[in-house]
Image: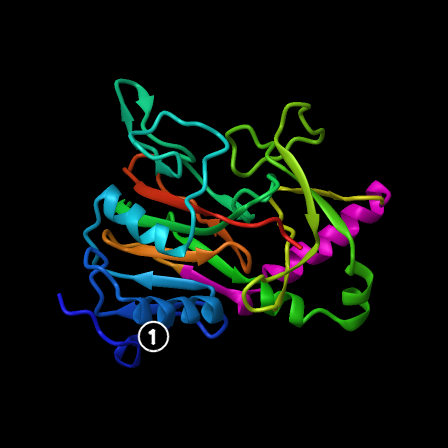
């Protein structure tokens, strides 16, 4: 397939606040550097990219992921079928009584991938293979806009604060225990981070994994986080993606949150995720 020049890219915004579909590209074919740089610029601006109608092997998905940087590594190992440490199956399918992937069922609150490690992933690339007839949609929220629209007194209040992020939900995507398990992965990052490529600021807390504000009394921390969670999940910041087989979605983990809607456990769902290593938020 002939690859279009950057000027010929066909782009459709997915929602006013976030997301762009790029049409007419077969990701099995090599992208020339100018075209990839154009795609990357759109990604920085729109935070989430959609490529529909793809037919990608794991190697082809990994190859495209590597255009964004060094591959990351899974923190939590799962019984998957991948040959790569950066690739994970997201699935409720069982073979011989065992799940073939991770995060199998149900709703998932807004979060940022690997925010509980020192260097969270920069990019996540999720490819749809089998999709239920309804539900299992992914919601994406623009954290640049979430920060930009905060009242100035709140921006001043959170400047320089650090938040502790913890992977503590133990397999349940909707439940976080009242106390942090001592062996749960955790790391503190700025409440407001600066995007290393664009210099834009973004809120960097989330309902699923942000546990507390460092140096703040629990009641005050809980109240502040509740305000920020409610603000960053406002509908005007969000795009809800309804998956089709062959969709590849690439999101910038430094400027977005994502969540998942519920779906029937009786229907199969299979997606393949690859991650790209990021830097330490600042």
> Please, which residue is most extreme toward the bottom here?
7
Q: Is residue 60 magenta?
A: no
Query: Crowdedness of circle 1 by 10 Å Cα count: few (<14), some, many (20+)?
Result: few
Image: 21 above or below 107: below
Q: Residue at the spot x=78%, y=57% of the render?
A: 160
- Colour mode of the rendering: rainbow
Q: Residue at the spot x=41%, y=44% of the render?
A: 71
User: Residue 64: where, in percent of width, then height?
Assistant: 31, 53
Q: Residue at the spot x=50%, y=64% of the render?
A: 238
Q: Quadrant of the N terminus?
A: bottom left
Q: In which image quadrant can residue 142 be found? A: bottom right
Q: Quadrant of the C terminus?
A: bottom right
User: Residue 214: where, in percent of width, then height?
Assistant: 79, 44
Image: 147 above or below 28: below
> Please, which residue is most extreme toward the top here?
96
Query: Is there any visible trace of residue 133 in the rendered image?
Result: no
Segment tinted magenta in the rendering: 216-240
Q: Is residue 61 left or right of residue 155?
A: left
Residue placed most toward the observer, 206 or 116: 116
């Amino acid at each position: 397939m002939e690859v279009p020049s950057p000027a010929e890219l066909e782009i459709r915004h997915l929602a006013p606040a976030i997301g762009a579909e790029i049409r007419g590209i077969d990701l099995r074919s090599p992208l020339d550097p100018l075209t990839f740089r154009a795609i990357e610029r759109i990604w920085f601006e729109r935070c989430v990219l959609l490529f529909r109608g793809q037919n990608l092997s794991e190697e082809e998905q990994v190859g495209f992921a590597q255009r964004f940087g060094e591959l990351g590594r899974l923190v939590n190992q799962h019984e998957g079928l991948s040959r790569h440490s950066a690739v994970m199956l997201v699935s409720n399918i069982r073979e011989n009584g065992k799940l073939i992937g991770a995060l199998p069922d149900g709703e998932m609150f807004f979060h940022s991938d690997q925010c509980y490690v020192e260097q969270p992933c920069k990019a996540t690339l999720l490819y749809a293979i089998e999709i239920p007839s309804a539900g299992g949609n992914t919601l994406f929220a623009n954290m640049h806009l979430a920060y930009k629209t905060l009242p100035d007194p709140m921006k001043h209040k959170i400047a320089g604060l650090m938040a502790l992020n913890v992977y503590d939900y133990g397999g349940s995507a909707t439940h976080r225990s009242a106390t942090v398990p001592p062996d749960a992965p955790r790391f503190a990052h700025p409440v407001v981070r600066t995007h290393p490529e664009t210099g834009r600021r973004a809120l960097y807390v989330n309902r699923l994994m942000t546990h507390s504000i460092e140096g703040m009394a629990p009641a005050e921390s809980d109240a502040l986080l509740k305000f920020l969670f409610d603000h960053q999940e406002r509908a005007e910041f969000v795009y809800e993606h309804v998956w089709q087989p062959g969709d590849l979605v690439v999101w910038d983990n430094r400027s977005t949150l994502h969540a998942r809607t519920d779906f029937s456990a009786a229907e199969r769902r299979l997606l393949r995720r690859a991650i790209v290593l990021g830097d330490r938020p600042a």
